[in-house]
Image (cartoon, rainbow, N blue to C red):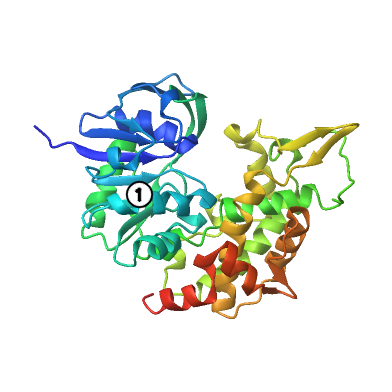
Amino acid sequence: MEKKINICICGGGSQGHISAGVIGSHNNAKVNILTRRPALWTRDFKTVDLDGKEYHASLYKISDNPAEVIPDADIVFICLPGYAIREELEKIKPYVSDNTIVGCAFGGSGFFLQLFDILGSNTKGFAFQRVPFTGRPKEYGHSATLKGYKPYLKIATRNVEDPRRLADIFQNWYSTPVYTLGHWLEATLSNSNPLLHPCRMRVMFKDWTPEKVYPQVPYMYNTDWDDESSQCWVDCDSELRHIMAKLPMNLDEVPSILEYYGCADIKALTNKMQSIVPFKTVQAHMNETHGGFKVDASVRYFTEDIPYGLLLIKAFAELTETPTPAIDDVINWAQNIMGKRYIHNGRLVEEIITIELPFLSKDNLRKLCQNL
């Protein structure tokens, strides 16, 4: 009989819900869930895709106590936004053994940097370059809707003895080709959500003022996506590629936005973003007010993609002495809405970064980059 692989999924968001059903449907997986709301979960869990395919899982342990679900885990799989990762790592730290592999559904929110900072640079770690699925919880703790599969996935590792074996495990669970990356930076510097969402918001709400009321909630994609949004995204992506060219990573593993979507130019990218079916119904998150809607700075496009996305990229820009005028423009616009002061005169404000995002501090990055 094949030995079961113990995996603890941390977090009750989209990726955690979908993976609970998909991974748990395999006989070789024993799935635990670490969640703040265990009473809302059921052991009989189901994930359903848009074609009606159902993944049925019998979850093993569901708890808010890491002592109950972490010690026997071969793999700890964190499915949380960047701002929640530090707290989760500190919570599980006492129960992670030297043999435990700790990973994340998305590396582009600073996972590896936070992992090394909290658990130490020798920790066995992994992260996906892009999230494995698109979808949402259907009934919280009971079921999930899987809206889209990726044609392939890429996984980066650090200190893992056999990266290919780990990739094969997820390839089996997800029924999707999984390729190994050569360096953890190739899953850390991402041109997906950390650039995509802020660039789109910057264009949609470029005329923002504190008093500004908009008559309707625009679509993030669909026919509302325009060439200006495509151009902003490509400009920021170009600056990111200049940064990556100065680091020990393979640029071929992080294709440009135009390459990734198979587009020859800005117009083609616009057409592509308007046509992606799972994106068509996605609208900007806004607060309803008298006479219309106002921009909501509490949503993840700000709280996640700015500090744990664009600022991460900006920190590496300063490390490599790479100018980033397009990225700076987006950060300046966003920090005004957020009431923050992350950058000033094109430079990170170190006092604020050290307090709010210590893993991006100059001291931490210098220490980390001694082992790049």
Is 23 drawn above or below residue 205 in the view shown?
A: above
Q: Position of residue 120 (x, y in %)?
A: 34, 65
Which of these two is toward me, 101 or 131? 101
Q: Quadrant of the C terminus?
A: bottom left
For residue 281, above or below residue 211 = above
Q: Is residue 45 above or below residue 238?
A: above
Residues 127 and 84: in front is: 84
Amino acid type for the residue under numbered disc 1:
Ile
Q: Position of residue 67 (x, y in %)?
A: 29, 42
Res 273 seen here: yes
Quadrant for residue 311, please give it: bottom right
Q: Residue 289: percent from the left, percent from the top?
A: 84, 33
Is 110 placed left or right of 290 in the picture? left
**Is residue 217 visible to us here?**
no
Q: Secondary structure at mark 1?
A: helix
Residue at (34, 48) in percent of width and height: 178
Number of numbered callouts drawn: 1
Question: The N terminus is located in which quarter?
Answer: top left
Q: Is residue 137 left or right of residue 122?
A: right
Q: Is residue 48 above or below residue 182?
A: above
Q: Tell me what residue is drawn at x 52 percent, y 58 percent.
A: 190
Residue 55: name its quadrant. top left
Query: Residue shown at 60%/37% (left/top)?
Result: 276
Q: How many neighbours does mark 1 have within 10 angstroms: few (below 14), some (14-19), or many (20 or more)?
A: some
Tag 1 residue: 92
Q: x, y percentage for residue 149?
A: 45, 36
